[in-house]
Image: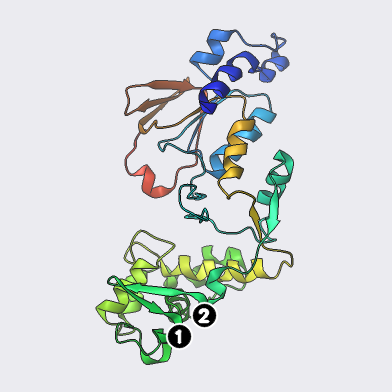
Amino acid sequence: MAMQHRDALSRRQLLGAAALGLGLPAVRPLWAAEREPDVIVLGAGLAGLNAALLLEQFGLSVRVIEARARVGGRLYTLDQVPGRPEAGGNQLAAGYARTVAMAQQLGVALATSGASPLMRPDRMVYDIGGQRIAAADWAASPLNPLPAALRALPPERALARLAGPHPLAALSDWREAVAAPFDRSLLDHLRSQGLADAALRLFATNNSYGRTLDETSLLTLLYVQANTAEVMKIKGPLQNVRGGNQRLPEAMAAALKGPVLLNTRVSAVDSDARGASVRCADGSHHRARYLVCTLPLPALRGIRFNP
C-alpha cells in the first residue's frame, strides 16, 4: 500500500531539472514521467536506494526495480520473530559514517547498542547436526571438528586464524601484484592445511563472504580482515536503528519521488544509442536514458546483458 501511494505521488511531483539547462519547462509531462524515466536503478538495497536519492537530488527522474518483496538488500529485520532479530547487517560502527549520516538526514532514530554477540563467544550456542552445544562445552565436544589448536575458538574466529595474517599494508593493496598469490580459492587454502571434511562443512556454513568456500577468494577474506582492523580504529558507539535496521532502507525508499517496483525480477538488459531497455520476468518492459546496476554478482547470473 505504501509503495503504491508513493508511486502515485511521484508521478505528480517528478521534476525535470535536467531540462532547465536546455531552456525547457521544469515540470515534465505526465506521460513522460510514466513511460521513460531518466534513470533505472536495479536493486533496492542500500546502494541502489542511495544512488536513486542522489540522482533525484540532481533533478533526474528515477525508477528502482527490485526482485524481492522488500527493500533493504543485506539489511533484513525479522519483524515476525519475537525480539525482531537481524538476519542481515547487525550494527552500525562509527566507521559507517555515510550510513549514520543517511539515518540522521531522514530522521531515522539510532540507539547505542551493546557489543556484538560475535564478540561474546561465552554467550553463543552451537548447532551441529541438530544438537545444541553450549559455548562452555564447545572445546571438548566430540562434534567439534576443528584442529586441537583451534577447538576453543568460535568457527568464524578459527577461520580468520586459518586464513592467516593479511598481507595488505594499505586497503588498496589488494589490487597490487604482491596480493595476487592470495587470490585463490578459500577451499583450496583450507584443504592445504589438512582440515577434515567436517571442519570444511562447518566453515562453509559460517562463510559470510561467498556462496561456497570454493567460490570465495582467500584474498577477499584477508581484505575483510584488513578493513575490519581499520574500521575498529575509528572510535565511537555501536548503534542500531530503533525498531530494526530494516527501518533505514524503508525510510530511504519512502523519501524517493520515483517508484520502487517490488517483486519485479529483471531477466534481460539491452542497451543501444537511445539508452537502456529492461525486460522483466512478469512481462513488463522499462526504458530509460541510463541504467545503474547495484545488484551483487550472484544476482547477475540470471540476467542477460546485450551487449
* Residue at figure coordinates x 59%, y 43% from the top left: 247
Specify the quadrant of the image occupied by residue 111: bottom right
Quadrant housing residue 210: bottom left
Above or below, 219 relative to 74: below
Where does label 2 land, which residue? 122
The quarter of the rendered structure image containing the C terminus is top left
Q: In the image, which disc is placed on residue 262?
A: none
What is the secondary structure assignment of the residue under circle 2? helix
- Rate crowding at label 1 as few (under 14), some (14 to 19) or many (20 or more) other CA atoms within 10 Å: some
Q: Amino acid at mark 2?
A: Asp
State whether residue 150 is above or below residue 265: below
At 54% from the left edge and 70% from the top edge, which residue is drawn?
Answer: 117
- Inspect this view and state whether residue 12 appears: yes
Q: Residue at x 66, y 56 (%)?
A: 96
Q: Are marks 2 and 1 in contact (CB under 8 Å)?
A: yes
Q: Amino acid at mark 1?
A: Ala
Looking at the image, residue 248 sits to the left or right of residue 69; the answer is: right
Tell me if 36 is positioned left or right of 279 in this view.
right
Q: What colour scheme has been applied to the protein in the rendered image?
A: rainbow
Q: Is residue 176 left or right of residue 251?
A: left
Which is more N-terminal, label 1 or label 2?
2
Q: Which residue is mark 1?
A: 136
What is the x, y in percent for residue 288? 50, 22
Q: For label 2, count other residues whose C-alpha is less than 10 Å away and answer few (under 14), some (14-19) or many (20+).
A: few
- Residue 271 in the image: state x and y as whole percent: 42, 27
For the residue pair 204 and 303, the one nearer the viewer reads as: 204
Rendered view: 5 above or below 207:
above
Give the x, y percent position of residue 129: 27, 72
Res. 97 visible in picture: no
Residue 299 coordinates in the image, percent (x, y): 38, 44
11 versus 176 height, above or below: above
Farthest residue in the left direction?
Answer: 197
